[in-house]
C-alpha cells in the first residue's frame, strides 16, 4: 500500500492517516476496508486504535465523525477513548524489539518508578512507542537485563 492510497482512503472517509493506514493494513481488500471503517468489530477497533496511537505523536485522531483522544499524561495507563462512547477504551499497542505487540498501559504498571519518572521529565511528551523504547534502554542500563515486556516471549 502506498502513501497515496492511504491519503485517498483517509480523504474519502474523513479519517486520520494513522487510523486509515491501520484499517488498510488489517483489511483483505477495498470492500473489507470499507466494512471495517463502517462497522468494525471490537477486536478490529482495539488493534487499529492501539496501533495508530502507538505509532503517533498526536493526542487526537479521527475515525470519520469520531474523535479519538489519548490521555494527557504518560504517567497514567495510556488509553484511547472514543468521545461518542465515553465507556469505550482501547489499549495503546507498541511493538517490542521482537515484533510482539505490548499494551503500553500494562507495561507502565510494572516499570521502575524512578526510571519512568526520569524519562517522563526528559522526553515527554512523545509517542508511546518512543517512550517504551527509551524506557527499555534505561531499564537495561540500570538493571543489567531486558525489561520483561521487551523480551522475545514476555511473561508478566
Image (spheres, grey):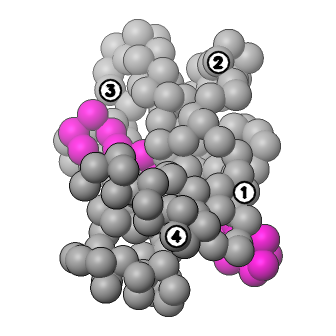
In the image, is residue 114 above or below residue 84? above
Quadrant location, the N terminus? bottom left
* Comparing labels 2 and 3, the label whose residue is closer to the camera: 2
**Disc 2 and disc 3 in contact, CB within 8 angstroms:** no
Cα gap from disc 2 to disc 1, whole angstroms: 20 Å
Indicate the position of residue 77 as horizontal and vertical percent values. 66, 50
Cα gap from disc 4 to disc 1, whole angstroms: 22 Å
**Disc 4 and disc 1 in contact, CB within 8 angstroms:** no
Toward the viewer: 111 or 136? 136
Residue at the spot x=60%, y=36% of the render?
Answer: 57
Secondary structure beneath label 3:
loop
**Disc 2 and disc 1 in contact, CB within 8 angstroms:** no
Secondary structure beneath label 2:
helix
Residue at the spot x=52%, y=70% of the render?
Answer: 12
Q: Please tell me which of labels 4 and 1 falls first in the chain.
A: 4
Residue 123 circle label: 2
Q: Please tell me which of labels 2 and 1 falls first in the chain.
A: 1
Mark 2, other Cα within 10 Å: few <14 / some 14–19 / many ≥20: few
**Disc 4 and disc 3 in contact, CB within 8 angstroms:** no
Assess whether residue 33 is covered by the magenta stretch.
Answer: no
Residue 146 circle label: 3
Mark 4, other Cα within 10 Å: few <14 / some 14–19 / many ≥20: few
Residue 137 circle label: none
Label count reads 4
| Residue that label 1 marks | 69
* Comparing labels 4 and 2, the label whose residue is closer to the camera: 4
**Disc 4 and disc 2 in contact, CB within 8 angstroms:** no
Indicate the position of residue 134 as horizontal and vertical percent values. 48, 21
In the image, is residue 5 above or below residue 54? below
Q: Please tell me which of labels 4 and 3 falls first in the chain.
A: 4
| Residue that label 4 marks | 12
Which range is magenta?
Answer: 81-99
Amino acid at each position: 500500500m502506498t502513501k497515496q492510497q492511504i491519503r485517498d482512503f483517509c480523504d474519502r472517509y474523513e479519517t486520520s492517516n494513522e487510523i486509515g493506514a491501520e484499517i488498510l493494513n488489517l483489511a483483505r481488500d477495498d470492500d473489507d476496508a470499507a466494512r471495517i471503517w463502517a462497522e468494525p468489530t471490537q477486536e478490529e477497533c482495539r488493534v487499529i486504535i492501539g496501533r495508530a496511537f502507538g505509532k503517533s505523536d498526536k493526542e487526537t485522531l479521527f475515525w470519520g465523525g469520531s474523535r479519538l483522544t489519548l490521555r494527557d499524561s504518560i504517567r497514567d495507563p495510556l488509553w484511547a477513548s472514543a468521545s461518542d462512547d465515553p465507556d469505550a477504551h482501547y489499549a495503546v499497542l507498541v511493538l517490542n524489539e521482537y515484533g510482539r505487540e505490548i499494551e503500553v498501559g500494562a507495561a507502565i504498571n510494572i516499570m521502575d518508578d524512578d526510571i519512568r519518572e526520569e524519562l517522563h521529565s526528559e522526553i515527554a511528551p512523545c509517542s508511546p512507542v518512543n517512550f517504551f523504547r527509551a524506557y527499555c534502554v534505561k531499564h537495561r542500563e540500570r538493571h543489567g537485563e531486558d525489561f520483561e515486556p521487551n523480551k522475545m516471549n514476555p511473561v508478566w
